Image: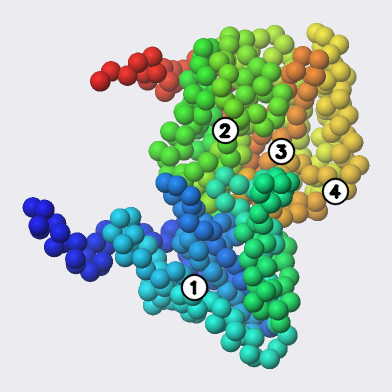
Amino acid sequence: MKKFLFVLCLFPISVWAQVDVPLIRSDFKAAEFTARRNEIIRQIGSEGIAVLKGAPSPRGFTRFRQTNEFYYLSGIEVPHAILVMDGNTKQSFLFLPNRNEARERSEGKMLSAEDADWLRDTQEFDGVYSTDLFAEWLGRVARRGKPYTLWTPFQPGEGFAESRDMGLRVHADLYSDPWDGRPSAENRFISLLKERFPMFELRDLNPTMDEMRLIKSPAELELIKKSTFLSGLALMESMRSVQSGMKELELDAVAKFIFYREGAIGDAYYSLVASGHNAFFPHYNAGQRIMKDGDFLLMDYAPDYGYYMSDVTRMFPVNGKFSPWQRELYGFYLACYKAILKHIKPGQTASQVRAKAVVEMEALLEKTTFSKPEYEKGARNFVFTYRAGSFNAFTTLGHGVGMATHDVGSYNGPLKPGMVFTIEPALRVPEEMIYIRLEDMIVITETGADILSDFVPMEIEEIERLMAESGILQTYTRTTAGIKR
């Protein structure tokens, strides 16, 4: 048997091709990626060349995930790939590493430069070449004798569970470390382009791409809806499963099971499962606290589904029943929150939505009696802050969501069909470290706003009713006390 296996390993790599393992995701037709590349070509003009470098191989035993920027324009998931869009010839070219047969024998078929014919025919690239020919290709462009401009992203590429704001924070931390200080991958690529091809002017491609990503296509909206649906299912199952005595991270496990069971490729961001006073810190993510009877729990978690994210938050009592103070403050907040949702419409600016919603919020405030002066103070500060935003022309209702949880693009102007964002106003009572926040996914349509996550209970009675049901963690017994052999 050993001799037979040895001989078999000498066969060509094609013998080992997998069956029914797609090399390209089927969420988008090739024509949609082509249309995006053609729009880049149109915007950079006949003397522009757009160049994007994809993500490198990941460290450790980690599945590869392409950067959002590279995937948005190509749909290609290959480490160390380069994408070029030539404004002069109106063509797009892909540069891929050569086939690594030894790695394919271990991990399976991977796209490579040797798949050029198939990629040209099925994915609508005008040419596919080896990455070691990229410098030669740029050299040929330089010999055309025109003052070309190279357009490439200057901002951090968005990778696994990453938005641009987090990428910028990582770079700032590296630059501030006297024992590190390494340049970002983007800065390194820009430096090499300047060093090797000084005849080209370099300009930032991010603003062009950011504006394109602001309005989602129907295919993008379908992926966002699926991501939102999974986020909602995870939150609802967590409501059923939570009990005092559990560690916060146990709800992370519940959500991950649902995400991956239903086809997610990862997390949109780290889970925010914050019980008690931990909820006062909006991005608390340690997950190590043991939850107690009487705790009010904030859970904010969503998956990465086919490179598209969601962002949904709910709050609920660990013991399944709202206490008097939770019912009082959460009830007031919820009424204000629904007033905001009601006024979100296409054509409205964020300041206009705020101005209309705050009229209802102020009326509610004046007729509400609070049990403590600290609660009334927190409620008044919440409404006052929201009112102040209505006078700011640059205010937003929340943040965009798409390929990143904190998505790119400007949401300052009138709301347009195809925009996707969340709202997440927060009510704080600092004296008792109380923090209350909800968050929903909103898509602007031609006639109104579609609240994608409105199937997830937010009414007090609905939450309590759902929490009375048995959950996944009630049917699974923990083995951490000792694993039998």
- Marks 4 and 1, the one that precedes in the sequence: 1
| Circle 3 residues within 10 Å: few <14, some 14–19, many ≥20 | many
Kindly tell me whether residue 485 is visible in this rendering: yes
Q: Which residue is mark 2?
A: 271
Q: Residue at x 61, y 53 (%)?
A: 158
Q: Residue at x 55, y 70 (%)?
A: 83
Q: In which quarter of the view is residue 35 placed?
A: bottom right
> What is the basis of the colouring in this image?
rainbow
Q: Are marks 3 and 2 in contact (CB under 8 Å)?
A: no
Query: How far apart in space, not on screen, are marks 3 and 1 (Cα)?
Result: 43 Å
Q: Callout 4, which amino acid?
A: Phe
Camera-side residue of 259 and 281? 281
Q: Callout 3, which amino acid?
A: Ile
Query: How far apart in space, not on screen, are marks 2 and 4 (Cα)?
Result: 30 Å
Tell how many labels: 4
> Which circle, 3 or 1, is nearer the viewer?
1
Camera-side residue of 277 and 389? 277
- Marks 1 and 2, the one that precedes in the sequence: 1
- Marks 2 and 4, the one that precedes in the sequence: 2
> Which circle, 4 or 1, is nearer the viewer?
1
Task: Give me the disc on residue 131.
Answer: 1
| Circle 4 residues within 10 Å: few <14, some 14–19, many ≥20 | some
